[in-house]
Structures are given as structure tokens and as C-alpha cells.
Amino acid sequence: MSLSHEIATYLNVISNLLIIAILGYLLFKVIRYYGSKLIKRVANKTKTEFDNILIKNSFFLNLSRVLVLFITYGASKYILIDFPHFLDFAQRLVNLLTVISFIWLVKSILQSIKDFLRTLTAFKDKPLESYVQIFMILIWIIAFVISFSIITGKPLLRFFTALGAFSAVLLLIFKDTILGFVASIQISVYDTVRLQDWITMEKYGADGNVTEINLTSVIVQNFDNTITSIPTYSLISDSFKNWRAMNHSGGRRIKRAIFIKINSIHFLTDEEIDSYKKIEFISEYTNTIANEVEKYNTDNNVDKSLLINGRNLTNFGMFRKYLDSYLKQHPKINQDLLFMSRQLAPTPNGVPLEIYAFSSQKQWVIYERVMADIFDHIFASVPYFNLEVFENPSSLDIVSLKDSKNEF
């Protein structure tokens, strides 16, 4: 074109850059589009969703970038043939971009593998995020060393030697990460926590379902829709409650007590025993035990002019027997597991009468209703045994007492 050498040189660089840019863009589009199409065809024959997962995690986008950068690096010595003093700088820049693009490519592969494993039943509740994160940390460290070597032009061996001397500082910096990684492995091996497990950890105010287990924290969505973040290592070093075994067992435990006033407990008279024979749950028992007590007192010539002499029945004992029979016939109580009513040590508020049983309904709402129905029945049944439930006096009780004194 009869141009000067200097102008021709610059035009040559510009034209080469334009050609490489156009070819790189076309290659980028071809790999991204047709690569995904090819994988889809293969995946359709193997009946897997892995191709969709790869596309979702931008695998082909990142692969296209890496291949284009490889081609750019190879072509750089031809593009800058007239500018050798820029060649080294350009190649270093391309190498840096290639390292960064390679990191994103590896990340997309790891994310795709994790998402694919999540579709398998065996891996749905495993802490896969922790393993992805630890691999990414290692890759970022290696990439940082390689990038620093590219920028300074120093050999990699020298940086790895310095990294060994810097290991103590690295251990301090990544202490939580290392502890979290170890904890993630222990959690997975010993199967202490899974995704969607209901856990309770009072130290951190956690009471809900595990939604995520990663390298540094365990995310719990509490039942009040708040989110609690627990350090992963705390699930190894501290105590917590996992309700998974309850969900897989035959029932959910009911363990609640009412307090009976001590002065309402007394020996039963013959008239009271006869009245208890009309209660269906204990009718047969009352007849049997009453005959047994009467026979014992007769055989031993017990003076029954005083009720305390000999063997006697109490209204509290009969009430416990009634509750045992009530629980035995209750359709929502698992009869294969332990159930009973038991008397605990007396307190200033009366004698605790505890119900210990397992509801066959484990879902929270239904479980609460079953337990409420049982105790509704218990509270309503107490007066039939001439017992009283202890409760602190309310303001209305005090006003009523004051009014009765004034009337007197």
C-alpha cells in the first residue's frame, strides 16, 4: 500500500488483533452453544440431568473463555511479531486471565458435581458444600502462587518454599476454615447432622431445621422463621440435641406433670369404692382390688373401726390406675413403647403426677393436639376422684376471700 514501515507495522497489529478477536468470539459462541447441544444429546441417551446442571453452572461459558485464552496466547507471538518488547507483558497478562478463567471453570465443575449428587438419595443430606469450599480454597491458594510467579517471573519452587516457611501464619489465618473442614468430615463420617435435621442448641438459640452445612457454619432455620448460624466446629466441640432419631422412631415422647394438692389425698371409704366401680376404665380393677383388700383385712382380723388400720385404697392410687387404663386404650399412644403415670417427689406446690408416654403422631401440630387432649381429659377427671389440682391463687380468689370475710 506504499505506506511507511512504522504505519504498516501498527496496521498489521490492529488487523491481527481484529482477526483474533473475531475468531475468538466465534469460537466462544460455537463452544458455548454447540457444546451444550452435544452434551444434551448425549445426556438424553443416558437419562441424566447432568447436562442441564453444567449449563446452569456456566460450564460451557467458562470452558469457552479458557480455550479462547489458550488460542490467544499461542497467537500472541505472531500478533506482536513487530513489538517483541510488549510480547512478554502480553503473555503474562493472558496467563493471568487464563489462571482466573481456569479457577471459574473448576468451580463450575465442582458445583455441577455437587448439584448432581444432591439429586441422588444417598447424598441429599450430606455436607457437600464443605468439600467444594475446601477444594476451592486450595485451588485459590495454588492460583495465587502461580499468579505471583507469573507477575514476578520467579520460579514456582521458590514460592512454595516460602509458603512452607509461612505455614504457621497460614494456619493461624485459616484456623476456622481448617477446624470447619475437620468438623465437616467428622459430621459426615459419624452422621451426627444431616440437612433438614431438626436440631436444638440452646447456646446459640437454635431450634429448627438445618438448611445448609458449609465449611465455616451450619445454617438453621428456626421455627419462628429466624435464621441462626452455628460454627461448624461447635457441632463437634459442644453438645446439641438432634431430633432425627425421634422422627424415625415409633413415637414422640410426652412427659408432663400436674400437681395434686396433698391434703386432697385420702383413704377410700366403702361408699367411694362403690362409686369407682361405675367408672368403666377401672371397674374390673376396682372389684378385684377391693375384694383382695377386704379378704386381707378379714384374714388378719384388722380393726376397721379406724380407716387407717390394715390395707386401704387411696383416691390418688385409683386415679393413677385410671390414667394407666386411659393411656392403654388411647388410639394416639404407641402401645409398643413405654407408657405410665408416675408419682414424683412431693414439692411445695403439691405432688407431681407425671404422664410418660409416646404419641404415635410425631408431627408437631398433631402431637401438641394429642397431648392437649390427654391433659384436658386428666384435668376434667380429677374431681371425680375427690382430688384437687394445685394452682397459685389469682386476684379473683383473693377478692372472693375478702368478700366472704366481710359478709361474715
Image (tube, rainbow, N blue to C red):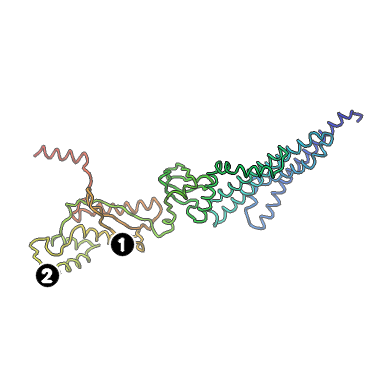
Local crowd size for mark 2, using a 10 Å CA cut-off: few (<14), some (14–19), many (≥20):
few
Q: What residue is shown with label 1?
A: 329
Query: Callout 1, which amino acid?
Result: Gln
Instruction: Say which quadrant the N terminus sits in.
Output: top right
From the top left corner, tell me how far across and down residue 168 is, in percent: 57, 43
Q: Where does label 2 land, which residue?
A: 300
- Answer yes or no: is residue 79 visible: yes
Quadrant, the C terminus: top left
Estimate the x, y position of residue 331 in percent, counting from the top left: 34, 60
- Pick whichever, 205 or 381, lies toward us: 205
Question: As drawn, which residue projects farthest toward the right?
Answer: 2
Label count reads 2
Image quadrant in which you'd find residue 250: bottom left
- First in sequence, mark 1 or 2: give its number: 2
Name the side, left or right, on which 317 lies relative to 126: left
Residue 182: percent from left, percent from top: 53, 50
User: Considering only vertical position in the picture, is 272 above or below 24?
Assistant: below
Q: Secondary structure at mark 2?
A: loop
Eye-nearest disc, 1 or 2 = 2
Q: CA distance from mark 1 to mark 2?
A: 37 Å
Is residue 211 shown left or right of residue 4?
Answer: left
- Name the residue located 27 percent from the left edge and 61 percent from the top edge: 324
Whether the residues at callouts 1 and 2 have beta carbons within 8 Å, the answer is no
Q: Which mark is residue 392?
A: none
Q: Position of residue 193 (x, y in %)?
A: 48, 52
Question: Depth check: 85 or 297 in front?
Answer: 85
Mark 2: amino acid: Asn
Nearest the viewer among 402 and 369 is 402
Horizontal arrangement in the rendering, residue 249 relative to residue 347 (left or right) = right
